[in-house]
Image: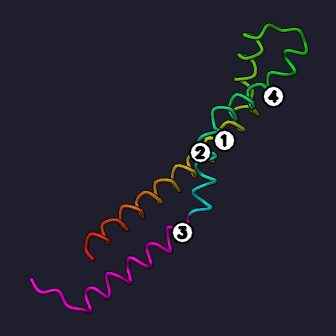
Amino acid sequence: MEIHHSDTGQAAARLKSASKSLHDMAPRLARAVQVREFMPERKNNLLAYHMRGYIEADMSIAKAEALARTRYEYIEDLNDLMKQLEAAELVIHQYKTEQASCGSRQIVI
């Protein structure tokens, strides 16, 4: 199989484009990783926020947690957090896909 100079040039251009794409994604990736890493703490903080009123009313922790988890506002806020996590996971997946594509282009060159 014969490799032409134009083929190598096209592959190099695609590699450069992919590298630029990875570089451009870096800030979004950093934010996405941060969202994923801190999600457990954010969920705990959200629950504590919604439990506070019950605890201040001298309810037991278990009862305050159960009541907080059934509040519409808590469920709505938790769904918002889960949407953020889903968006973050999508960015991470896109980055890994682009990274794999970039790696395969390097092999071609």
Residue tagged by mark 4?
49
* Amino acid type, mark 4: Tyr
Is 18 magenta? The answer is yes
- Give the residue type that dot 2 points to: Leu
The structure residue drawn at horizontal position 37% and vertical position 68%, both measured from the top left corner, is 102
Q: Residue furthest left?
A: 1
Q: CA distance from mark 4 to mark 2?
A: 19 Å
The residue at which mark 1 appears reads as 81
Q: Which residue is mark 2?
A: 85
Please state the horizontal and vertical placement of residue 84, each as a whole percent of the image. 63, 47
CB-based contact (under 8 Å), mark 1 and mark 2: yes
**Vertically, is 56 above or below 83?**
above
Q: Residue at x 46, y 59 (%)?
A: 94
Would you say the magenta stretch is mainly helix, strand or loop?
A: helix
Question: Is the Cβ of the residue at disc 3 closer than 8 Å to that at disc 4?
Answer: no
Q: First in sequence: mark 4 or mark 2?
A: 4
Give the label on residue 109, or none: none
The residue nearer to you, when weighing 96 against 45, is: 96
Identify the element where label 4 is drawn.
Answer: helix
Residue 44 in the magenta stretch? The answer is no
